[in-house]
Image (spheres, grey):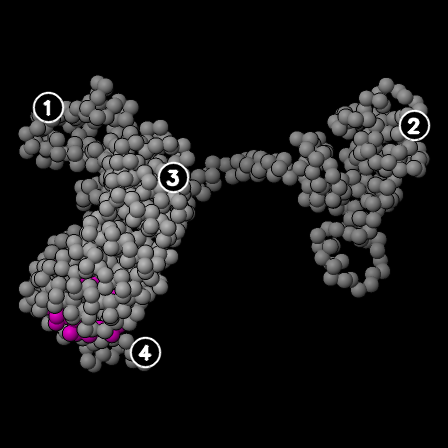
Amino acid sequence: MGDLRAERIRGFRQRNIRGPRSALTDYLASQNISARQIRANHEARLRAAAAAAASDQAAASSSTAQNVESTEAPEVPEAVEDDEDDAESSVATGTRQAATRKRKSAAAAAEKIKKSKSSKPRKSRRNASDDESDEDALERSAGPVPGQLENCEECHKRFTVTAYSRAGPEGGLLCPQCSMKLTKEENAARSASRKGKQKATAVPIRRERRKIQSLILDGQIGVKTLMTLCVETLANNIHLADDLGDLPLPAIDRISRQLSKRRLMGPITLEFFLRPQTQDVMIYDGGRLGSTDYMRIFQICSTLKTLKLRNAIQFKDEVMEYLIGRHIALDTFYISGANLLTEECWEKYLKTKGQSLRSLRVYFTDRYFGNRTVESLPSYCPSLKRLKICHNQAVNDEGLEHIAQLRELEHLGLRLVSQTQTTPYVNIAQKLGGQLRTLSIRDIPQVDDRLLDAIHDHCTRLVKLRITNSEVMTDAGFARLFMGWKNKPLQFIDLELCRYINPVNPRVNEHMIGFCSAGFRALMKHSGKHLKKLNIHGCRHISGEAFEDVFAAGKVYPELLDLEVSFCEEVTDLIVGLIFKSCPNLKKLNVFGCMKVKDVRVPRGKILVGVPNAVGMIIEGTED
Amino acid sequence: MATKNISPHKFVTLVSSDGYEFVVLREATLVSPAIKGMLDPKSQFSEARTGRCVFEEINGMVLEKVVEYFHYWYKNREREDVPDMEIPVELCLELLMAADYLGLDSKNTRSFVS
């Protein structure tokens, strides 16, 4: 190949006078393609073909034994190469080689046969004198012409020669597969010899570091549990499995999660989770399952009680009809992303199967599962204890009114797309307050303090409270909620983004709108003892003094595991230190956007997430 | 450790269903809440007195891997960058059962480490 390029350069030098070059010529030149060479190659081929025809005639007339046997065999060119020493071989050698190309033409000339023989590049290179003519040089370079078909030297397969075709060790050309193999081998050999052991180990270490960071973000620090190791190995080799056997439910759930994470949950892997006696089916990514796959679940698992499906796009009316037709009475139904299920179908399902339902969670629907469906819940599902409607575009204030009629409801989670008003929520708190254990309401910018007062007055058994994105609730309202509340200390509180929004003057909050210092103090006084998780993300008007008071030396929040104070601007290094001291069991502290946190000592076993420095997203403590 | 004062043995013996015995560092086995419970001197289980745990559900091959995991955990428990332990594919499911039985799950281990 090197010779080829040299020839091209020489060719360019000879062209002294040049006109303006077209873009095409430039492009072709940049790709090492020259029209001149293509023409030369073409002529060379014509000549070779002519020679072949001539030799055919000669062969026919002379009828020597060797000629007869060689005409068909494709390996002949290599045989010719082997005896390369007799370069000045007879006309017969040339004819043999040419004959294999099977090209026919009329003309014949002895000297042209010699030239065609020189189209074997390596052989002629050995013998070529320096003062060979340009024509000879061009012809020689023409050996393997781009676009021409050639047999691979390694595997003898026929392939199309391109500008990238590589020469093999024997001088012939290699097909793309073989040349790729050769390149790989060469690279491997080169890196092994040049870099030695040191570099070879350096690469995995760097990758290791990234992997460790990624694992920490997934919540995995230090030694993996045996369960995790097994589940990962299993997911890596799931194609070898034909049955999972009698595994306990937590293990099955872990496997299902891992397979879904790796996007391996398809029709074949689904089979592992379906057995006649299965009561729980949990699929975390049903994106690759079709309607028939979902029907298979109901075909096989006749005693199904719990069904959890995420991304169940193909869970359509026909699947629901099938479920309605089977003797399956689900008590937990969790479905996400099934927005092809029509309102009528939901109604029909709830009417026939709603009696047994204790938990219904519906995520990501657009046109269906609207007010009418919610309206039907109290009559069709009298024993419903848990209801969650998230990312729902059809339910609005009107539908909310009916939730208050659910007599048994203990856990309520709502995240509606439409703007809702305060009254229906107040109504829910009044009617169900005495029994609710979970109240989670997200994205309610227009809901005001009246809801907080209603919760204060009526809710007495709450364990988990979430109110997010309220733009009008006030600090005084929050303080009233937590002060003197009959409810036991809560375990989970999430008041994310309950804050005053004013783009002109964001830091001035005259009327103390949002969750601020007074509310925070009251909250920690009321629930601090048993609080496990607290999220006050974006409650930016909580003052530094409030934080310092709440986490002051001597105060202990023994059960707090997870604290999120991102975008609370007053959080400083001192406050983070106080938090670590007063929360002995804290696992994770999020401080994204707390720009006053700069250099904190993190105790061993605790994770600080989101410090704005170069150390990384997450710092795991090393201090004892 | 408190257990050392009461039970003089630094090592415990784990016995598989087919009679193979593995002598393991006591502290290393404590990663498993199940074994920890068995060996708890307050529990009055025979295992706590003899330092010998017999697992009728776990065969020798699987128990060998479990013991290997105990050592792997013990060796790496203070480290952050831990290379994954190799799990033989053919033992994977049985090992998963054993892991569940011994409580080698994320929740349990996490609480132990802290």
Numbered range of the magenta stretch: A437-456
- Marks 4 and 1, how far apart in space? 71 Å
Residue type at mark 3: give it: Thr
- Marks 3 and 2, how far apart in space? 68 Å
Residue A256 occupies which quadrant of the picture? top left
In front: label 4 or label 3:
3
First in sequence: mark 4 vs mark 3: 3
Asked if residue A438 shows in the view, the reply is no
Residue receiving disc 1: B50
Q: Mark on residue A58?
A: 2
Q: Closest to the observer: A311 or A163?
A: A311
Q: Mark on residue A503?
A: 4
In front: label 4 or label 1:
4
- Marks 4 and 3, how far apart in space? 51 Å
Helix, strand or loop at label 3? It is helix
Residue type at mark 2: give it: Ala
Up the image or down, A245 lies above or below A501; here it is above
